[in-house]
Image (cartoon, rainbow, N blue to C red):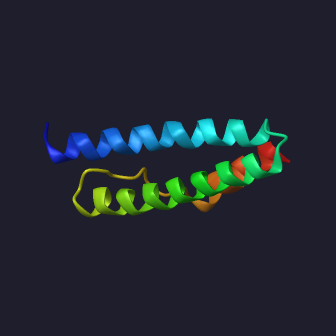
Amino acid sequence: MNEKIMVNDILSGVKSSLSTYQTAITETENMELRQTLQQIRNNDESFQYELFKVAQAKGYYKPAAKATVTEIDEVKQCLQ
C-alpha cells in the first residue's frame, strides 16, 4: 500500500471518528465522560489537521476552489 492511500485512509477514519465523538458528546449526561470525549475529539481534530497539511503539501489532497463572494452571499441568504 502506498503512502497516499494510507494517508487518505487515516484521514477518512479520523473524520468518521470525529462524527461519532460529536454524537456521543451531545448524548452524554455524565460531565466527566463528556469532558473526556471532548478532549479526545479535540486531540483527533488537531491530529487530522496536521495530517491534512502533510497530505496537501505532498499533493495527496486538492481542496475545492474557494467560493466567490457572490456564492457566499447566496448561501447566507438561504440560511437567514
Instruction: Answer left or right for 7 relative to 80.
Output: left
Left or right: where does residue 34 sit relative to residue 68? right
Tell me where residue 18 appears, x and y as whole percent.
56, 43
> Residue at left 58%, top 53%?
40
Residue 69 image position (x, y, % from top left): 62, 61
Q: Residue furthest left?
A: 2
Q: Is residue 1 left or right of residue 48?
A: left
Residue 34 screen position, x and y as percent: 75, 48
Tag count: 0
Residue at image location 39% in from the left, 52% down from the top: 63
Q: Going by the image, does 37 lie left or right of 61?
A: right
Q: Is residue 7 above or below residue 1?
A: below
Quadrant where the N terminus is found in the figure:
top left
Closer to the camera, 15 or 27? 27
Residue at 70 percent across and 37 percent down: it is 24
In the picture, residue 47 is in which quadrant?
bottom left
x, y percentage for residue 7? Answer: 28, 47
Q: Identify which residue, 31 or 18, lies in the foreground.
A: 31
Residue 79: name its quadrant. top right
Q: Nearer the viewer, residue 49 or 40?
A: 40
Q: Nearer the viewer, residue 67 or 30?
A: 30
